[in-house]
């Protein structure tokens, strides 16, 4: 943010749901690229995973919200698509990041939506 916005911008983090720091690290990396997130927003209305990804980003940047943002909706959305990350065991952030991007890509290729 610009110096003027930094004075009023309150940084927020992502809540750890229990060994889910791999999710948080992956999201923080992707959220540091606003053009990437913005490119997904047109697809977010009809796709659950893409929608929750964009909603968490928007939640982090909403002035009136305080405290850590939850990643639970995204965790549930990715768990519905693949069993690889079900549960709350420690996982590899690189593997999650690759799967998240693949799942979002597959989702937005499905023009009719997934729900």
Image (cartoon, helix red, strand yellow):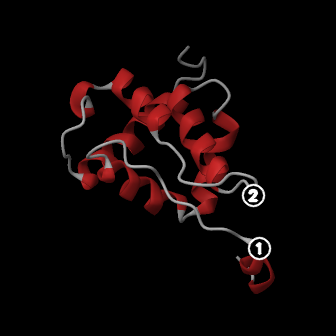
x, y percentage for residue 71? 47, 41
Q: Residue at x 58, y 56 (%)?
A: 36
x, y percentage for residue 73? 49, 32
Q: Disc 2 on helix, strand or loop?
A: loop
Q: Which residue is mark 1?
A: 8
Q: Is residue 19 left or right of residue 60?
A: left
Q: Which mark is residue 114?
A: none
Query: Which quarter of the image is occupied by the C terminus?
Result: top right
Vertical order, 9 against 113 (above or below): below
Q: Nearer the viewer, residue 33 or 24?
A: 24
Q: Is residue 40 left or right of residue 105?
A: right
x, y percentage for residue 102? 38, 39
Q: Is residue 83 left or right of residue 40?
A: left
From mark 1 to mark 2, how far is it between C-alphas?
9 Å
The furthest residue to the top: 115
Mark 2, Cα crowd under 10 Å, few <14 / some 14-19 / many 20+, is few
Q: Which residue is mark 2?
A: 63
Q: Earlier in the sequence, mark 1 or mark 2?
A: 1
Q: Nearer the viewer, residue 52 or 109?
A: 52
Q: Nearer the viewer, residue 113 or 20?
A: 20
The furthest residue to the bottom: 3
Q: Nearer the viewer, residue 71 or 85?
A: 71
Report if residue 109 is visible in the image: no
Q: Residue at x 50, y 43 (%)?
A: 70
Q: Are marks 1 and 2 in contact (CB under 8 Å)?
A: yes
Mark 1, Cα crowd under 10 Å, few <14 / some 14-19 / many 20+, is few
x, y percentage for residue 90? 19, 46
Query: Which quarter of the image is occupied by the N terminus?
Result: bottom right
């Amino acid at each position: 943010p610009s110096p003027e916005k930094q004075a009023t911008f309150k940084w927020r983090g992502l809540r750890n749901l229990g060994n889910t720091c791999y999710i948080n690290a992956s999201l923080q990396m992707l959220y540091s690229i606003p053009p990437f997130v913005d490119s997904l927003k047109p697809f977010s209305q009809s796709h659950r995973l893409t929608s929750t990804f964009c909603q968490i980003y928007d939640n982090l940047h909403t002035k009136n919200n305080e405290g850590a943002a939850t990643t639970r909706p995204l965790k549930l959305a990715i768990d519905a698509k693949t069993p690889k990350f079900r549960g709350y065991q420690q996982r590899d952030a690189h593997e999650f990041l690759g799967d998240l991007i693949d799942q979002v890509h597959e989702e937005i290729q499905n023009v009719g939506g997934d729900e």
